[in-house]
Amino acid sequence: MRELDYVRASDVEEAVALVSGDPDARYLGGGTNLVDHLKLGIARPARLVDVGRLGLDGVEEQDGPDGRVLHVGANVRNSDLAAHPVVRSAFPVLSRALLSGASGQLRHQASTGGNLLQRTRCVYFQDVTTPCNKREPGSGCSAVGGYGRQDAVLGASEHCVATHPSDMAVAMAALDAVVVVRGRQGERRVPVRELHRLPGDRPDLDTTLEHGDLVTGVELPFTDAARCSTYLKVRDRASYAFALVSVAAALELDGDVVRDVRIAWGGVAHKPWRATAAEEALTGRAVDEDAVRAAVDAELAAARTTDQTAYKLPMLRGATTRTLLRLAGKDPS
Amino acid sequence: MSTRTSTTPVTPRSMGTRLDRVDGPEKVTGRATYAVESAAHDTGDPLHVWLVQSTVAKGEVERLDPAAALAHPGVVAVLDHTSAMRLADTDDGELAILQDPRVHFRGQVVALVLAETSEAAREGAALVEVSYREEPHEAELREDNATYRPETVNPAMDTDTEDGDVDAALAGAAVLVEQTYRTPHEHNNPMEPHATVARWAQDGTSGEVLDLVDSTQGVHGVAQTVGPVLGLEATQVRVRAPYVGGGFGSKGQPHAHVVAAALAAHAVRPRPVRLAVTRQQMFALTGYRTATISHVRLGADADGRLVGLEHRVQEQTSAVKEFAEQTASPSRMMYAAPARRTSHRLAVLDVAVPSWMRAPGEMPGMFAGEVAMDELALACGLDPVELRLRNEPDLDPETGKPFDVRRLPDCLRRGAERFGWADRPREPRSRRVGDWWVGTGVAAATYPAMKMPGNEARVTALGGGRYGVAIGCVDIGTGARTVLTQIAADALGVDPGAVDLEVADTRLPSASVAGGSSGTSSWGSTVVAAAQRFREEHGPDPAAGAEVTASAAKSPAETETANHSFGAVFCEARVNRWTGEVRVPRLLGVYSVGRVLNPVTARSQLVGGLVMGLSAALFEESWRDPRTGHVVTQDLASYHVAAHADVLDVDAEWLEESDEAFTPMGSRGIGEIGIVGTAAAVANATHHATGVRVRELPLTPDRFLS
Ligand SMILES: Cc1cc2nc3c(=O)[nH]c(=O)nc-3n(C[C@H](O)[C@H](O)[C@H](O)COP(=O)(O)OP(=O)(O)OC[C@H]3O[C@@H](n4cnc5c(N)ncnc54)[C@H](O)[C@@H]3O)c2cc1C
Ligand code: SF4
């Protein structure tokens, strides 16, 4: 581990100035991802700027530009956010997604901003002795032709087939959350669906943020669909495992017919994957097993699988069907 | 000098009772120090050692440049094959590190960095520049490359066996099951990673040159192995292992890091060094269970009686050191088939050295054999419990000897009763509860009862009715300290509180490894021998200072009978109809293991074995990338072991029993049998739940989705 400076910023302006002015500086949230990276040699910053004491700890209802939102400060811990009464009642998908992630200790430590910006768990990315385009641009992608059980089936490129590991971000994608960012140019709002990017030929870039951009919070718009929402995570063991695939879904019915549906998938792409083709296929229809399967297949038309990832398609079909039938109040069993 | 002493059965007083762990308070209050925390060498201001590992699977180190590492603040030295001490014996390819530029597997130790802090050592290791002349390698086990026939398989068994005309028997069988079963590489992953603290004392006044505190399953074994490698007599190596956080076989013999610590300590003698292996490094350096491919053929008559049995195993060893797992061994003694054939063939690969892992041989072998028996039961239209009962042998099929105790039928019947087996629908895929297909499965378990040679114990009267009992064995967390205290107390006829037990130091009388489920049998019999001899020589009221050192003579069972423990594992599995996820709400093992000496520590072993078997059934797999020879799932986030949420109703029960023909305590050994058969019971239950037969571990959700 390289020796480094540690600075605790006292306000947002100072934090942004410290990091944007120094290409070797990084923000430190709860540290549950970044500190591992320091030990493993994946990240070698010269300076860490701790953003844990910037006053970004509130969860408050506000009027946003497009209506009422719940504003979540970037430093709110995953466990606090999951337990928040408004989150539990108005955004159950988010609470469930958070609780399905990591372990109790990690959730107490992990921050909202850090969770959004955690990096892939691709085993080659995490091992500096193997080539990886994300870690070392141009060195090659070891995952192609290698261990691929966790790899992407949508939106991957020949340069990178990694998946984004966050459960929380999948729920936020389904909720059309907006990330509030402070950069050198001041504050801007980035829809969470536009925060993470597909790898293309620049897998080293996880997000559309620039160096020095600080996440200060996330806004969750109140909707009827969000109230009727849930998260299903499929994994090998019953807890403490990253998703093989996951489904975040929110549903508003008009009688029997879908008025508004949001579906986001985890474990399938370099970013939380909003299944818009599936949403379109379902809108205006009744929710039944055949309709959901057809909708999922519409989304998966673009999927590319290998021997190791082929299982993700039937798993997505099953998980999505089960989730939507439950939300529609139809006991699937 | 010790005398070989015949023992008489010990009347149980403390044995069989729930004595609390004698080292419990130290452990729960954090006062128990594990190897890397040991203060033994603190006064010598220890340096920290970090291992530099090869990044190619085969070839030679071309150039190793330590300059950048040496320039890093805190780094004191870099050792490589040009600068490390020459070893006296390089026959053991795993231990012969830093002697030449050859690279035999990816992750091999190619240099050591010594520094004032652990952080500086680690950074120094990252700064050592190594270039290699790479050669083509082979790192993948396949059916077409596992063709090498070893001379023997572990520990010294026949590679192949054949009794009767197997082909004719199978050709004439009314029912035939012919299938291939696979188990993956598995890594032991004890809670405490391997670590060694070493100090090389130049003056040899006490006759000791190298002083080690090591995380090992046997201190004498370490001294006997690394002594000659370093050119020392075993007596010149002192090894201590006061507390060990698990081993599961991976600490059964010293691996390269112990030699690395010794070489580092030699370079800076008399300054001590501290070497902690990281979790990731364990995946290359501290052993693992080989993957196995089992080709099984079972032939039976119309009533389900086996007429022929074949178990051909393919597995791997490493080019640098041979290790031949005895995977087919349980098929040699399990069931009464008149014609039987077993064989082992290995792929010799450019990979890290396989080693012992809990129930080597039995664990993968019984997965294959017991899933095959389940398939045979279905093919014969028989209940799987009944099929096993019909194939009970009268004599051990392998040796022709009578069994010492063989109570598999009792285990099956008792387990079936407690589990509620009678209500089970015969047809697979006949029960669904909500999102889950529900099924049950059974498998048999077995493990040989063993005693190891090379044990001595010393009993000393301390005065005031107290006794010192000393034997150099290691308590790796199993509770050996506690159980040996109970055995010594009963053998001496005193309260456990009157016994001061000393263990885990080569200065104490010699002890065999904590492995092969042989520890309590071997050490306990020895302690009994010493105690009984002590009473013979010194009577009930000995003078303070009276002392006897003794070893135990063989018991009659060791030569006259075939000695094995048995068990039956019952499992309920649920498979999610939407996602393929597998969960195990119920797991029960019923065992015949001789007398249980302490129900608390025994339960930990048996339930722990069941949990480890469950973990292997559902999750564990080390994925070696054939392109690099590297295990890429090298941490506990990608190498999954069972989490708490996976371990629901897991229980173990044992039959009332005392095997005094085998040991004077009546016990037989319990450390490994819990993992045996468990994965088969889970696989059989998932088949019963879904109708999908999975013949390869682990049983991950993808295997149940079509
Ligand atoms: C064993 C283990 C299991 C896990 N399992 C799961 C799981 O099942 N599901 C899941 O979703 N996650 C899982 N995680 C990941 C965990 O959720 C993340 O590590 C955590 O959310 C990161 O938050 P943090 O605050 O600790 O981030 P940090 O480690 O502090 O930071 C992560 C990144 O975000 C940057 N950053 C932090 N805060 C800000 C900010 N305000 N603005 C801009 N940049 C910032 C940092 O510079 C860094 O690059 C697991 C982690 C571990 C170690
Ligand atoms: S998939 Fe992406 S992260 Fe993984 S090795 Fe390839 S480039 Fe690196």
Image: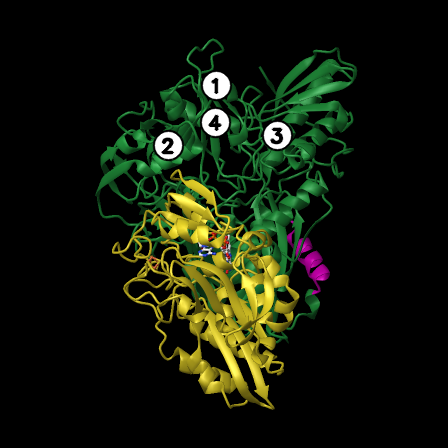
Chain colours: A yellow, B green
Q: Are callouts 3 and 2 both on one chain?
A: yes
Cα separation, mark 3 vs mark 1, equals 34 Å
Q: Is residue B641 magenta?
A: no
Q: Is residue B17 above or below residue B388?
A: above
- Residue A218: where, in percent of width, then height? 51, 65
Label 2 residue SS: loop
Q: What secondary structure predominates along the stretch shown in magenta?
A: helix
What segment is highlighted magenta in the picture? B406-420
Q: Which callout, 3 or 2, points at the residue further toward the start of the chain? A: 2
Pointer 1: residues within 10 angstroms few (<14), some, or many (20+)? Answer: some
Label 4 residue SS: strand
Q: Chain of mark 1?
A: B
Badge 2 vs badge 1, beta-carbon distance below 8 Å: no
The residue tagged 4 is B197
- Residue B506: where, in percent of width, then height? 53, 22
- The numbered dot on residue B134 is none
Q: Is residue B206 above or below residue A312?
A: above
Badge 3 vs badge 4, beta-carbon distance below 8 Å: no
Cα separation, mark 2 vs mark 1, equals 26 Å
The picture quadrant for ligand 2 comes to bottom left
Badge 3 vs badge 2, beta-carbon distance below 8 Å: no
Q: Which callout, 3 or 4, points at the residue further toward the start of the chain? A: 4
Q: Nearer the viewer, residue B549 or A229?
A: A229
* Camera-side mark, 2 or 4: 4
Q: Is residue A328 above or below residue A37?
A: below
Does residue B377 appear in this view?
no
The residue tagged 1 is B44
